[in-house]
Image: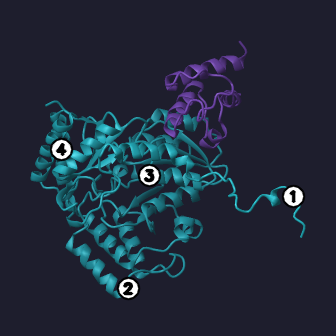
Chain colours: A cyan, B purple
Amino acid sequence: MNVTTEQAIVPETEEPQAADLFDKFAPLIQERDNLLATGVRDPFAIVMDEVKSPTEAVIDGKDTILLGTYNYMGMTFDPDVIAAGKEALEKFGAGTTGSRVLNGTYQGHKACEEALKDFYGMDHAMVFSTGYQANLGIVSTLAGKGDYVILDADSHASIYDGCFLGNADIVRFRHNNAENLEKRLAKLPPGAGKLVVLEGVYSMLGDIAPLDVMVPIAKKYGAMILVDEAHSMGFFGEHGRGVAEAQGVLDQVDFIIGTFSKSVGTVGGFCVSNHPKTDFLRLVCRPYTFTASLPPSVVATATTSIRKLMHAGNKRAHLWENSKRLHQGLRDLGFTLATDEPESAILAVLLPDQEKAVRMWQALLELGLYVNMARPPATPAGVYLLRCSLCAEHSAEQVEQILGMFEAAGKATGSIPQ
Amino acid sequence: MTDRATTFASVEALIEPFNAKGVELGESTTFAGDLEWDSLTVMDFVASIEDEFDIVITMNQQAEIETVGQLVDAVEESKA
């Protein structure tokens, strides 16, 4: 073959000049390098060497109180939950090696869906492999081309990603602003399909949505409503069904999305609904179909935990006591909190910038307290915070210990006055 | 002023609170490149545009809008 084109006679030793795919991350890499160069520990690289209980772990050889988990109801070490997991592991093996719609549905997956139906008093339940996939799947599958998804601007990444995976038009409204929601809905074509997506508790600031106002507005415009109760299942409402139950609008919500990786204490996600065609979604929802189902031990632990959470009134009451005490105590010390009142089990301590937030975070860790450090884009623009999430298993003494550590760390880092 | 010029002036005024670097604004000023806005700033700004003109700008439309001029055109179109 004759080699005549200019391109072809370029010497073979010269490398082609394609763009570096990592270039787009250069500013973030720089920011991270600068932060770590100041000598602070990496807040996103914590390793727990031992976990002693829902509220205690060993990090870097040090006994540490955990105030940054989603283990709200402290179910991870519940003896009945552990026993159920062990039994299923032995009887059904380590994993299913298959999709829910092929070989990956065992008796345990159905039992778990029955537990969810009982817990919520609803007709249908679908168990996904994670909560992220439940949002990804339901949002992207329900809203297709020509439909609209109307979502709160502060929605979780899994909801946004569900929007990006689907083909619907995406409309945002200002966070928790019912008037803004109505304004947007009023501008959309009346005949178009609409899915309004709300969350019970917003996980970064720990604030709750005015669902009792927003849900009727969405209904007025003929929208279907999906409420993500990931951070509220287990301790909001009489039966622990979430903020929609607590505010008396659960019967108007079309789909509840939830997770097993918070109050339930393991991993997995779900959708419950009274819609008669819910089960059909199993066949068309790609994040449900094209992934392996949960291991038998996981669904067994989830089932046991969900059934126990139905009767966890005392735990719920203690969790609220913890949240109120910590909120009041932190305010008394002079910290700025994201919400004026404790609205959930999440309390966010606001700090002015990333450096102060990381220094405070590290000082707490050195004293033996783990909290989450969070920054934009996980938080709203310009918001740096230490997120504290309480557990029903935190004792009243631990909460006082935690306040003592906040006082010491706050004074040492100048976050509160001496 | 023409309708478009009025809209341009209003958009300019709405950009100002987010224009931390004091970039001079023109038709071809880009949001990501010239103004160096991140996704969260864009989100807050778009909400203020939607409220000011009482329109909806979907995230799908936003993905296509790179310059101030394109935004003004999109606002004009939505108002129509």
Instruction: Answer with the quarter of the image where residue A60 lies.
Output: bottom left
Front tag of 3 and 1 = 1
Residue at (20, 59) in percent of width and height = A55
Front tag of 4 and 1 = 1
Q: Where residue B9 sits: x, y (%)?
A: 63, 17
Read off the residue under disc 2. A92
Contact? badges 4 and 1 (CB < 8 Å): no
Q: CA distance from mark 4 to mark 1?
A: 74 Å
Read off the residue under disc 3. A227
Q: CA distance from mark 2 to mark 1?
A: 63 Å
Q: Which kind of residue does numbered mark 1 sit on? A: Thr
Q: Tag 4's secondary structure?
A: helix
- Mark 3 or mark 1: name the one nearer the start of the chain: 1
Say which of A100 and A14 sits in front.
A14
Residue at (37, 37) in percent of width and height = A383
Tag 2 and tag 1 share a subunit = yes
Say which of A358 and A287 sits in front.
A358
Q: Tag 2's secondary structure?
A: helix
Q: Which residue lies most toward the bottom here?
A: A91
Q: Where residue A396 sits: x, y (%)?
A: 11, 52
Contact? badges 4 and 3 (CB < 8 Å): no
The chain containing the residue under callout 2 comes to A
Q: Where residue A417 sits: x, y (%)?
A: 16, 30
The chain containing the residue under callout 1 comes to A
